Amino acid sequence: MTAFEIVPASFDAASVAREARRDHRLRNWPVVYTLDSDRPGKRRVYVGQTNSVVSRMPQHFKVRPHMESIHVLLHEEFNRSVALDLEAWLIARFQGDPEIRVENAVTGEQGNDYFDHERYRAMFPDAFAKLRDAGLFSLDLDGIENTEFFKLSPFKTLTEEQELAVQEVLDGFFEGLRTGSGSSFLIEGEPGTGKTIVAITILKQIVDVARFNPADDDEQGERIAEHRSAIFRALLPKDLKIGFVVPQQALRETIQRVFEKTSGLSGSMVLTPYDVANSPDSFDLLVVDEAHRLEQPGNHGTQNKRYEDAGRAACGEGGEASTMLDWIIAKSQSRVLLADVQQSIRPVDLPADALTKLRDTGRSHVLRSQLRVRAGDVYLSYVRDLLRGVATEPANIRSDYDFRLYDDPLAMYEAIQARNREVGLARMLAGFAWDWPKATRNDPDAVHVVVGDLALPWNRAQKDWVNSAGAIGEVGCIHTIQGYDLNYAAVIIGPDLKMDPETGQVRFDWDAYRDPRKERGSRKRGIAAHSDEDLLEDIVNIYYVLMTRGILGTYVYVVDPVLREYLRQFIPAAVPESADI
């Protein structure tokens, strides 16, 4: 198989003409090219494809005069389908580089199949390596694909069902603008189905519609998306007000950084539910990620008054009894909610029937393809069956997925450190079954999670803990990991989840659950008391979230010996690291 070649050139007509005289493929051959500007602190890259570099560049000279150099990727076996696919693949990797800002709009033609697709895809890392050798990337490929910028990039290739969800939302949004009626859309999906990517892509495409100038469109040619037409652009308000609502504090700053790095988006678009409620203006569109984490009246700790004031600001007098979903509806003409009711983890979270009503009154779409955990399609339901104690036989988990049950929590920690050295993004996680006194949260010597010979602190960073400097020496809780991907997750199932040795039923131990915001219910605040079954479901949901973070593997230690013996039938036993192959 031949290798990729790179033809470098300065960003000017004379340089392009000189290189075209040396190599006829710059005049008539399918290629992928990059344009870049290497100004300190303002590194910008644009990726394109064309059948004629010589014909294409004059338009770039006009539209992108700030660029400084060109790199043309050539391959003897290229065709247009390969060029389109490689273009999209490279854009996503450039977006993942923390030192680069990508100038492309969302690639119009993603995920198309073509002859010998897998063989060509196997060649793409060579193209990456050539460009990195030329100085265009600051990280290696694994490093790029571990960044939040790559994982949450709106330039990533969407699956067919994800593209359909985006298209249906755009259709409904623009129809709501045309009629003045607005629109509501619910997108549901289990962990790893790409809900957040869909959400960010929706906003990116709407922003691209709003700022699209046909005279400047030098990137997609005939691939201009339907929603960029003049008809749709005319429907958008000139002062378009859109927002991306992220209920979780831990995830919010991460998404803000992604938005700041993405052309057309801004970190100021990322909002809390309180920002929405207290905004003096209404929004043309609100997209809500992790909508199951919107809250209802209940135990908000020191934030109870803030919650009630926000409810009145959004919904008027009596609004103190409203839910955060009510705030979203009251303050937006159109809204899109992305949710998984099986990830609700506290009594104060939005009740499932609130989302059911939205499903019944608006449009809805279900994402079914699980793209995160490489254990196979059965893994998610299998984990839920294990945690409920109803599994009866081992599932057909992919043999290359690293699923292990440990008898020694310290050995599990040592293994996760080894995985972190190998591939990065390997973390310890645990259920909220250990105290976390406020006075010790910033104490560098404090330990909280103590199991056998293992003694570690809870996560010190409250925001973006996964990417914080000390994360490998800490234990992440549910509130800091939900919404994130890991390569490997090591999960401690604490004493809050047990199995009755006589009945074989899994039960919840209220006294062992240490979340300071736990409550069974509050008549004063309008929440009916939660039954033991409701609370068991919340704890099962917590461990379900923890055990569905690991892309390459999940390690498990169980404090309760009866539950551990039950799981031993279904999870392969860990072997010493020295015996690993």
Image (cartoon, helix red, strand yellow):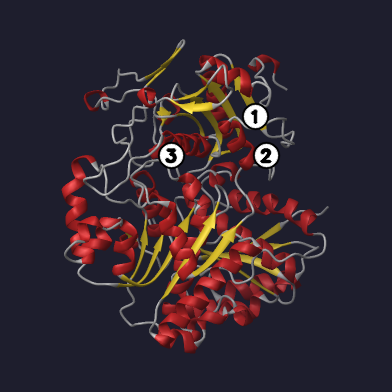
Q: Is residue 42 visible?
A: no
**Residue situated in front as seen by the camera: 216 or 167:** 167
Q: Is residue 304 visible?
A: yes
Residue found 60% across the figure and 68% down from its top: 164
Q: Amino acid at mark 3?
A: Asp
* Secondary-structure class at tag 1: strand
Picture quadrant of residue 263? bottom left
Q: Which residue is mark 2?
A: 375
The image position of residue 101, as x and y in percent, is: 45, 59
- Crowd tier of the residue under label 3, counting other residues whose Cα lies within 10 Å: few below 14, some 14–19, many 20 or above: some
Q: Earlier in the sequence, mark 1 or mark 2?
A: 2
Q: Which residue is mark 3?
A: 534
* Secondary-structure class at tag 3: helix
Residue found 53% across the figure and 70% down from its top: 11
The image position of residue 250, as x and y in percent, is: 36, 43
Q: Which residue is mark 1?
A: 403
Q: Earlier in the sequence, mark 2 or mark 3?
A: 2
Query: Marks 1 and 2, how far apart in space?
Result: 9 Å
Q: Amino acid at mark 1?
A: Phe
Q: Amino acid at mark 2?
A: Ala
Query: Marks 2 and 3, how far apart in space?
Result: 29 Å
Residue 420 sits above or below residue 259 on the image: above
Residue found 54% across the figure and 15% down from its top: 561
Asked if the residue under mark 2 is in contact with the one under mark 1, i.e. CB atoms within 8 Å, the reply is yes
